[in-house]
Amino acid sequence: MAKKLWGGRFSKKTDPLVEEFTKSIQYDYKLAKHDVLGSLVHAKILAKAGLISQKEGKIISQGLSTIWGEIKSNKFVFDKNAEDIHTDIQNKLEKKIGVAALKLHTARSRNDQVVFDTKRYCVFEGAHIIKLIKKFMGEIDNFAGKNKNIILPGYTHMQHAQPVALKNYILAYKYMLKRDSERLSSALKRMNYPLGSGALAGTPIEAEVYNKAAKEISDEMGHPFFGTVENSIDNVSDRDFVVEILSALSIIGMHFSRLAEDLIIWSTKEFGFVEIDDAFCTGSSLMPQKKNPDTLELIRGYTGKLYGNLVSVLVTMKGLPLTYNRDMQLDKEPLFDSTETIKKELMILAKLIKGIKINKDKIYQQLKDESLYATDLIYYLVDRKIPFKNAHNIIGKLVKYSVENDIQIKDMPESLLKKFSDKFIKKEIVKLFDPLVSVKSKRSIKR
Amino acid sequence: MAKKLWGGRFSKKTDPLVEEFTKSIQYDYKLAKHDVLGSLVHAKILAKAGLISQKEGKIISQGLSTIWGEIKSNKFVFDKNAEDIHTDIQNKLEKKIGVAALKLHTARSRNDQVVFDTKRYCVFEGAHIIKLIKKFMGEIDNFAGKNKNIILPGYTHMQHAQPVALKNYILAYKYMLKRDSERLSSALKRMNYPLGSGALAGTPIEAEVYNKAAKEISDEMGHPFFGTVENSIDNVSDRDFVVEILSALSIIGMHFSRLAEDLIIWSTKEFGFVEIDDAFCTGSSLMPQKKNPDTLELIRGYTGKLYGNLVSVLVTMKGLPLTYNRDMQLDKEPLFDSTETIKKELMILAKLIKGIKINKDKIYQQLKDESLYATDLIYYLVDRKIPFKNAHNIIGKLVKYSVENDIQIKDMPESLLKKFSDKFIKKEIVKLFDPLVSVKSKRSIKR
Amino acid sequence: MAKKLWGGRFSKKTDPLVEEFTKSIQYDYKLAKHDVLGSLVHAKILAKAGLISQKEGKIISQGLSTIWGEIKSNKFVFDKNAEDIHTDIQNKLEKKIGVAALKLHTARSRNDQVVFDTKRYCVFEGAHIIKLIKKFMGEIDNFAGKNKNIILPGYTHMQHAQPVALKNYILAYKYMLKRDSERLSSALKRMNYPLGSGALAGTPIEAEVYNKAAKEISDEMGHPFFGTVENSIDNVSDRDFVVEILSALSIIGMHFSRLAEDLIIWSTKEFGFVEIDDAFCTGSSLMPQKKNPDTLELIRGYTGKLYGNLVSVLVTMKGLPLTYNRDMQLDKEPLFDSTETIKKELMILAKLIKGIKINKDKIYQQLKDESLYATDLIYYLVDRKIPFKNAHNIIGKLVKYSVENDIQIKDMPESLLKKFSDKFIKKEIVKLFDPLVSVKSKRSIKR
Amino acid sequence: MAKKLWGGRFSKKTDPLVEEFTKSIQYDYKLAKHDVLGSLVHAKILAKAGLISQKEGKIISQGLSTIWGEIKSNKFVFDKNAEDIHTDIQNKLEKKIGVAALKLHTARSRNDQVVFDTKRYCVFEGAHIIKLIKKFMGEIDNFAGKNKNIILPGYTHMQHAQPVALKNYILAYKYMLKRDSERLSSALKRMNYPLGSGALAGTPIEAEVYNKAAKEISDEMGHPFFGTVENSIDNVSDRDFVVEILSALSIIGMHFSRLAEDLIIWSTKEFGFVEIDDAFCTGSSLMPQKKNPDTLELIRGYTGKLYGNLVSVLVTMKGLPLTYNRDMQLDKEPLFDSTETIKKELMILAKLIKGIKINKDKIYQQLKDESLYATDLIYYLVDRKIPFKNAHNIIGKLVKYSVENDIQIKDMPESLLKKFSDKFIKKEIVKLFDPLVSVKSKRSIKR
């Protein structure tokens, strides 16, 4: 049985099944560096508060710094039998510096530590994700720039609607990502790393000591580091910050599932608008011709996982009385999983988009569909003083006639056109069936 | 069959089952006033753009203003057979002002309208919820003030942990609500009501016209009203703003489920810490003695609905290709339902908290539990230079001895205490078993 | 304030907000007929147990029968101010038969009633859904029969894979529905309507009386009606039967979302494999040419609601201590909503499928894609003793050559083919690029 | 880059990020033994069909049997760089038996393999879970038997309702588990392991060959092994069987969350009804007195994960067109995770329940609460011909008087009692305030 941070009052060993069931080291090892940082700050506070001597403070800090270095250089070997990362680091510190380590846990609790660690994880990984979003947004810009003259059919209900610039189509995703980034960013701003909550009731150290230590660390680090806790009970009890991140990541996943769907549909044989680079596709063990957009399918599919992770933490937190309950340990796997997933997806998409080949021929073939210009025909009539709803009705009938009689509007004689509206002048009408004319006539939007 | 905004090209009537299945008037009638406002703005734009005459613009505006008045005074009778609220209002406008109404739909689409309406609903209802949160936070402050001297056992894992001030306990919820309010508020800031997307591709009206109209309306209204759309495809395609609101409301619901659970547990016979006012309880049809905290139970239970609504929209949006798809109509019922639920809960909780009676006797009986002061005993030893982990171990054993021998620590002779640590001085120790002393000693937190 | 089934011990009126918040008549009115039936049975039991006289039993039964008739003929006007349907019916019974009604609630509780009513709702509606599934399965059979000779490209990863019979494609959905029906059916078999739980602890009436009454009713009704409760605490506490139904309905919704997606994709301009009948499509208020598959889009979209309803009840039930808690009232809206949704979707799909027009030309154009026959080329080599993995590799290279050099395999000279494998004999190879040959060669499956 | 089962037509290597992102060996290694079994059967079929020689069949079978033995004895080292378990096993087989292995993949596809493997996993693990449920049900029976004479307050709305036997309380969970087991069992019955789907279109081998092989294997194994596929497209496309299992496991988790909640509440200081054995509790790093019911809290908390896993697969499957899409690979992690979780919980609970100590004193103190007997007082009046609703009202007033005047009903003089009803005879009334009398009077339920 592994060494624990508690146990004095227990007369019986933990059941091995329970030890396995309750431990978290297998995932919370990811918090290691944040945990060490928290301990470094805490040691500083203990020394300031006189709860350890300056010398002890120094010994502890040196021990922690060594561990920090080991973690950074991947030399730290996690003890799979430790209850959690806090215990693992504490045990290793004891081995390194001996008795001084026994004082480090003064005036703190794992309840407090784990919130600190998890928030710092969120802030760091969140910032990383924001950077990856920016990078992907840049690639979207590049893609838009490279293909700025391409027009394709715009779809509503997956049916041909009106011609749109491919540039605008793809930039729609950039605007989604911009909000995604802002959403994440404002979630991170709501986070801080307060110290001094203890298990739930606070600690005997003056708030002022925490504040001073925080200030010093901010100066050292060059960015603000938060101090006293506002409400210690709230601090150890709540996980709304985890839910908020998971929700923001779910929304990103939702956006990506749509981008993936668009690209998957566009790369079907029938659409054929784009080709995804070999490097992002895989084949079939049976059908040798297959080149499947697996990467995009998995991005679409992982939406399930991202939503599931969000649901998981929401459910776990439902109805828990204050303050800390062990259930709350289960916030971490979903958080880590969604974070890793989105990071990978962003890195992959930023590369994938670069390799997309556009098949103009297939696209322009679709742009010949006259129905794409029906709205332009309405505006033609509206410009000639036909009330919109009447014009809508006229063009509806014209389209129906065209479909039922299998004749293109462009090919109808003027006399026939005039039966629908005497405003129609054939030589004017025919010019409207042009994707560029159509797109340019939409003056409400940026081009 | 009801009059529709489309149909020219159709040769067959909609199947009655389908008409029933696809219509949305039964819930989107809630968007009525926002829809009329959008139309008022649009009419102004059409006139500016010269697509309708000044006179037509005036007629339309007057018609819409009349409808607006009817909605405000609950005189507007929704047509249950209309396809949706946009159609209903358009049809009523036609009845009122005749032919001029036929021009209102120029250069716009329901895809665009519905985004405008829904965003404005979010902004208005969101602001209302923020106000209700503030009110409830005020009531929490009142409750905390009224009970500022009460101490109760603090719990972790639902077990006695350390004494805490009731004030701090309840204020934990205020801090949660503060973040809830900020979260909602930053979601609302990400929303605007852009015009000019048309169905997806933009409209023939210059962006400048939209901007000018927006500016004028801002001046009229005294608050900013947004103008040109940045990306029309994004604007009609995305519903991340709905998901973000539903997520923020789910988190509020999660917080409330915890408050409800706390109060329900505290009002059990066994705890007996509080009594909920009759006005918020109901009885049993069989057991006449019952006074059940039904209101709190339903608040706890509605968390399911709030989460379910979030999941519902996330799922609906998953994997939809751009741009608008009819699936997206299904964002509204969940949005409205969660909004209404949280509003009701906030109003009820603000009243309920006022009527809570505290049963000091039952609470103080629990504060006699010596184990609540075990951490204070550690600090006593730590102050006397025992390393924390050793002190933790000593007190663990002391507690175990106390439990197993059924003797209070307070009642142990000094000689016995000294067997655990020679630092123990009985007359000092006994003073520690005092809730006020314990709470005051936690100097890291506000009191 | 409405008349309630409780209240003796209360000194204060329920807060009007709370009355609104807690009542359920707005949705549980759907249980009316099941509630009356339960009361009829209960009255019979009371009489048998001697708790009411035979005469009272008769008066009550007559009163209830009248109400039953009113419900059946839609003449029963629900009292929107009643707390719930049980209260509403009780109040109406009192008005009808006076003092005898006051005895009906002897030895029962709403906790018990609501389980009875909800289970009976499930059993009845479940049976109805099973009937509708059968009907839809029949229509799938008809569709398959009508199109039994059509072959289309089969897809994996949305890419051309191998030719398949349209019949087999569509019958895949029939097999899903078959399991859906069996799943629902086995859920229903796990349900019964036990009586005698009271609020939680049972009633003073002998189990034997319940059993006898149940037997009599079974005989009257011609189908089994369940008797004594096995465990009264379980009976009033659990809602697993609701979750199970919601899960079964979610799976149906999942299947329908896939069918909808298939049909939506097939009815894009680019695929053009099918045309959905006008009666199941709607148009656009802006774009007169649009014919959108809205019905299918909503069926796809409602998956969100169905999943959300499942999540809702799962969450509500999470962590509730036994026995009945008011939270459990919130099982009904999701149950009713999912039930109604699936019923509508089944009715619509059974009609929609009849009106689907197949566009053979568009399909056969896609069948020309040689890559669909790559696996058949492998089997050609395998038959000629090339190990499968080698054959797979050879054909992979052949396909690659064909794509890169823009030459059809069919058009390659035998000399070129032989460079890939000397087994290739051109006149044999060319015969393989035939959808019918390909489909017929798959001898493992029914045709 | 790892060796793959495809690749002939690709000109570019897979991006390393993509390789990492798409592979599944890190979790699907759990399917290893099922995969080998499937291959053994497939080899037999190939030989029967003449696609490999008898000798080749034997070589392949021997190779696979060796691998099977390695897996069983944990000597099989999974190749972390393999794409998936199917590839890993295929590669190892090639190393072992050389060229014969190249023929094994004839007439099959990973699409087909993975369904076979996953279904067999479900059937085997499902059967294991059912066995564990039975074991836990047995322990519940033991617990009920051991404590058969203990009565405790029954709760509705967490308020004292009526006395119930502890035995019946705990047996309620047994009845839930019984349904859980049946639900799982009927899900498993809907599963089979059909062979011959190929990628989607079937294989060139006659259905009859599959059937014969299946029959032979059934005879060898002593239990039925399924044969020909009914619909190959359905077989490779659907994952309803995974969702159904995840739903059944979620319901078990829901039941456990309630049991956990009951036990956690009962082990609070305030209730104190039970004590959980040390072996299932953990302590605090700060508060040495703590003994926390962590195991139960985690069981309650894991409900989130179980629900999240269900949502995850439901979402992933939503809206996927037929047939196989790569998204479907993401069904496995949730399935494995929920399966492992429930297995662990069942093993732990079966042990935990044995160690529960009942604290009769604390329970019987609560049974003194007179309100628990209010319903018995009603039945007293009903027996004396007071209509139920009147009796309910009378006792309601009596309880209210008792509470407001702080006088026990037992202590009221008969004259006072008579003011509420002249039926009251004090010496009869006082006998009703007895838990055993109360429980025995509920004759509708088993004792």
Image (cartoon, coloured by chain):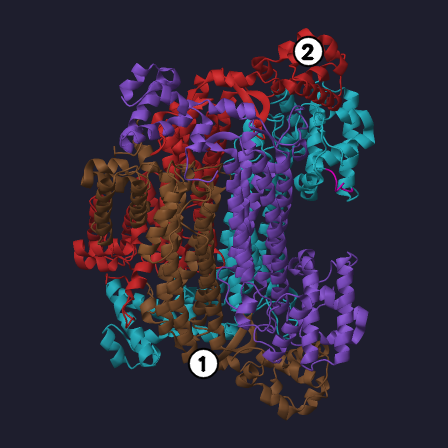
Chain colours: A red, B cyan, C purple, D brown
Question: x, y percentage for residue D114?
Answer: 37, 43
**What segment carries the magenta color?**
B77-82
* Magenta stretch: includes residue B81: yes
Q: Are marks 2 and 1 on the same chain?
A: no
The residue located at (31%, 18%) in the rendering is C417
What residue is disc 1 on? Answer: D148
Amino acid residing under circle 1: Lys
Above or below for C416 versus C332: above
Amino acid residing under circle 2: Met
* Magenta stretch: includes residue B419: no
Mark 2, other Cα within 10 Å: few <14 / some 14–19 / many ≥20: few
Q: Is residue D204 left or right of residue B1?
A: left
Instruction: Kindly state the secondary structure of the residue where label 1 is placed.
Output: loop
Above or below for C95 versus A125: below
Question: x, y percentage for residue C246?
Answer: 55, 53
The residue closer to the viewer here, D287 or C389, is C389
Which disc number belongs to residue A190?
A: none
Question: x, y percentage for residue C422?
Answer: 27, 21
- The chain letter under disc 2 is A
The residue located at (45%, 79%) in the rendering is D362
Instruction: Kindly state the secondary structure of the residue where label 2 is placed.
Output: loop
